[in-house]
Image: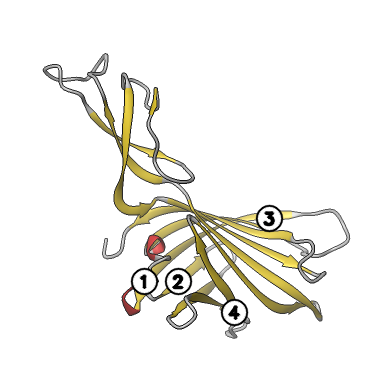
Amino acid sequence: MNDFDFLHGSWDVANRRLTAPLGSGPATWVEFSGHAVVRPLFGGAGNIDEITFPTLGRQGVTLRLFDHETGRWSIHWSDSRTGRPDPPVVGGFTGDRGDFHGEDTYDGRPIGVHFTWYRLGRLFWILSAEPAASGAVDGKAEVRAVYWTYSGAPTTRPGAVPGVAGPARSGRDGLGPDTARWEHEFSADGGRTWELNWTMDLTRTGHVGA
């Protein structure tokens, strides 16, 4: 039930949005900034996510709740322009990817809605197996912290960090990812095809309580 613990904290958000989803003309995208603060609820079985779009002059709020009976999450979004919640999307995570589906209407026609969450970069420690050519003290291997975007479990590979000699071992810092991505899609044909219409690329600015 702690799938969304990685999101707790504050984030800068780079948005890219399609101006006319499901339109027949050429695709036109707009970009705008955002800042989000996510606070946990129910010991990790929920959270509330408040986002501000300063250049648009509006805000949004997301409520995420974990259903203990079904083991699935429901995600509820509302925009300050309407003050009304959209129909929820429901789903869960497999590894570092979460998929959530729902139904809504757009321009008077029924559509399918798909949210995708990606847990991306984590802060890793990198420990060289032998002293680096520079920076080592008294022949001891040095430790450096780096950001490494990855998918899946940490691996061992030589030459992973410039200046660190020999095979490098990596480990998670335990604080969760420092980058994440959200994607929003519509389908007007019952899920046979999907059109991407909004992305958010998130970069952490603080952890919970920071």
Q: Residues within 10 Å of mark 4 (few under 14, many from 20)?
A: some
User: Mark 3 or 1 closer to N-term?
Assistant: 3
Query: Is 103 left or right of 96, judged from the image as shown?
Result: right
Amino acid type, residue under disc 1 in the picture: Arg
Disc 3 marks which residue? 30
Query: Is 176 left or right of 73, judged from the image as shown?
Result: left
Amino acid type, residue under disc 3 in the picture: Val
Count of numbered marks: 4
CA separation, marks 3 and 1? 28 Å
Residue at the extreme left of the image, as rendered: 138
Disc 4 marks which residue? 88
CA separation, marks 2 and 1? 7 Å
Query: Is 9 left or right of 84, judged from the image as shown?
Result: left
* Residue drawn at the location 60% of the way across and 85% of the way down: 84
Asked if labels 1 and 3 touch by Cβ distance under 8 angstroms, the answer is no
Q: Residues within 10 Å of mark 3 (few under 14, many from 20)?
A: few
Residue 204 vs 7, above or below: the answer is above
Element type at mark 2: strand
Residue at the extreme right of the image, as rendered: 24
Towards the viewer: 134 or 154: 154
Asked if labels 1 and 2 touch by Cβ distance under 8 angstroms, the answer is yes
Disc 2 marks which residue? 49
* Residue drawn at the location 73% of the way across and 67% of the way down: 186
User: Mark 2 or 1 closer to N-term?
Assistant: 1
Element type at mark 3: strand
User: Mark 4 or 3 closer to N-term?
Assistant: 3
Disc 1 marks which residue? 39
Asked if labels 2 and 4 touch by Cβ distance under 8 angstroms, the answer is no
Element type at mark 1: strand
CA separation, marks 4 and 3? 25 Å
